[in-house]
Amino acid sequence: MSDIAAPANAEVDQDRRGFLTFATTATGVIGVAFAAVPFIESWNPSERARAAGAPVEVNLAKIDPGQMLTVVYRKKPMYIVHRTPEMLAALPGHDDRLKDPHSKSSIQPDYAKNDLRAVRPDFLVVEGTCTHLGCLPKARFEKALPELGADWPGGFQCPCHGSRFDLAGRVFDGSPASTNLRIPQYSYPNDQTLIIGVDATTGAA
């Protein structure tokens, strides 16, 4: 009887060996997959890095003259305006109507503390939150809009309480906001690239 039972035992052993081989292989594959997840995720900026304010790179070629692009940096909207020669020509004519025309009481890096409030004249980079209560000003770039008056030079208007800012982010008299729109750190590594969050002077984030 032992001779008859031997093939059955051999078959059971063979089945058990196959199952163990499969289980070991499957465990190994699953282990590699789990081990790979942190490695793959390390290719992308972590949520912590984004929350801490990882720099934001912008392709300026995507912004036509006269247009604005909004990006998010440190959970705040950043307005990037490609100013036309006409927009720039309108800036010097209304200093007497501004609360802080030379940005002495407003927040900006030293390299943007000028009448254009910019490193490059053609691009305004500004935090898109009103300095009154933090609403998002709307672009009102067209001159002499009826609701803003014949002397409106173009700029931004806050929809919450009516604060008005020119195309350098400078606040007009009569606005609830007391200071100009804030300007973040930024730099240009080349003519077509803007990096918000990297200082133009030191190159540090």
Image (tube, grey):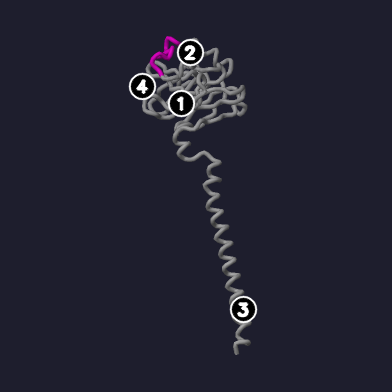
Alpha carbon distance from label 1 to label 2: 17 Å
Residue 140, visible in the rendered structure: no
Task: Give the percent coordinates (x, y) of residue 145.
Answer: 49, 20
The answer to whether residue 96 is magenta is yes
Residue range corresponding to the magenta coloring: 94-106
Badge 2 crowding class, 10 Å Cα cut-off, few under 14, some 14 to 19, many 20 or more, is some
Tell me which label, 3 or 4, sits earlier in the chain: 3
Badge 4 crowding class, 10 Å Cα cut-off, few under 14, some 14 to 19, many 20 or more, is some
Question: Type of residue at label 4?
Answer: Pro
Which residue is label 1 attached to?
127
Q: Is residue 107 left or right of residue 90?
A: left
The answer to whether residue 105 is magenta is yes
Alpha carbon distance from label 4 to label 2: 23 Å
Badge 1 crowding class, 10 Å Cα cut-off, few under 14, some 14 to 19, many 20 or more, is many
Residue 69, visible in the rendered structure: yes
Alpha carbon distance from label 3 to label 4: 90 Å
